[in-house]
Amino acid sequence: MKILTRYVQGLLLAVSIVLSHIAMAADAPSAPHLHDDWQQLLIRNVQPINQGHSSAVDYRAMLQDRSILKGYLNQLSLITQTTFDGWDTTQQLAFLINAYNAWTVEFILTTYPDIDSIKALGSFFRSPWDKSFIPLLGETRSLNDIEHKLIRGSGRYNDPRIHFAVNCASIGCPALREEAYTGAKLEQQLAAQTERFVADTRRNYFKDGTLYLSSIFKWYDEDFTMGFNNSHSVAAFLLLYIDVLELTPAQQSALTQQEMQIEFLDYDWALNDNQ
């Protein structure tokens, strides 16, 4: 009798868990509308600067809208791995980029305005990007988990342009886009983000025979060797954007022949706020 009772209790528990997961999935908005709240937050609180090449975040206004942000993050946490796997890769990648960016903003808000760099949220033993505090796809993850495991490490996407979409809340980073990423618009959005960053003459420019580049191209060199649009090096990737780089034919030739000196600029980790 005791065995039967335990069996029934176990069965009821299993049913309860399944029903709970079904209820959570039912509460989550569908993929096309999942990022609507994030879209509104970005429209209201992010402004283009530096002739459109960068953006500044109004974190004070974000603090006032924090309940909306938290509601959005809660909606992201309701998405199950099964639901995620059922999306196409553009929806998946848009989800992960938005999650990274939105959680980064929330991370800043935990101490704002008493913060001048995201690096202040780390410690002597652990960088801020290694802190596990993000409930996503059934696990508690860090920002590095999202970028390096779910995006870069999954083998599903292999698109170096993600480095111009994820935002680390710093001036040296590519702009936090003033709209949410969506599966339907992802190709257009990644193309625009890449062009606005590559064209930024404060972070990528040619001077006295040397091409000076953002350190992003050094840190993630391997991502630019995987054949995006048949480019297998940083130089080859940049040649896809010769118009926005404004290189002369001679400079283009030197870059093509790998005869151009390339140096990487220091990264500015100051907070990307609007103060």
Image (cartoon, grey):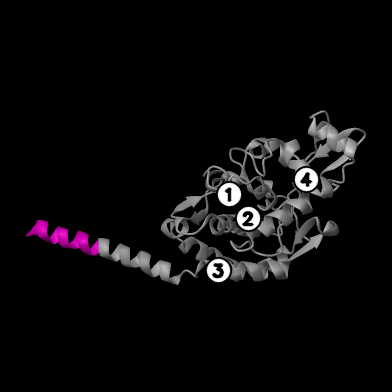
Q: What is the crowding at mark 3: few (fewer than 14 residues within 10 Å), some, or many (at least 20)?
A: few
Q: Nearer the viewer, residue 160 or 77?
A: 160
Distance from the alpha carbon under mark 3 to that under mark 4: 35 Å
The vertical placement of 92 against 238, above or below, is below
Q: Identify which amino acid the numbered label 3 is placed on.
A: Pro
Is residue 95 found left or right of 19 in the rendered image? right
Q: How many marks?
A: 4
Q: What is the crowding at mark 1: few (fewer than 14 residues within 10 Å), some, or many (at least 20)?
A: many
One can see residue 171 in this view: no
Q: What is the crowding at mark 4: few (fewer than 14 residues within 10 Å), some, or many (at least 20)?
A: few
Q: Secondary structure at mark 3?
A: helix
- Point out the tag, 2 or 4, that comes first from the N-terminus: 2
Q: Is residue 208 magenta?
A: no
Label pair 2/4, CB-CB below 8 angstroms: no
The residue labelled by disc 3 is 32
- Point out the tag, 3 or 4, that comes first from the N-terminus: 3
The residue labelled by disc 1 is 143
Distance from the alpha carbon under mark 1 to that under mark 3: 24 Å
The residue labelled by disc 4 is 268
Comparing marks 3 and 2, which lies closer to the viewer?
Answer: 3
Distance from the alpha carbon under mark 2 to that under mark 1: 8 Å
Residues in magenta, as a range: 1-13
Q: Identify which amino acid the numbered label 1 is placed on.
A: Leu
Instruction: Name, please, the residue furthest toward the right.
Output: 208
Label pair 2/1, CB-CB below 8 angstroms: yes
Q: Nearer the viewer, residue 38 or 155?
A: 155
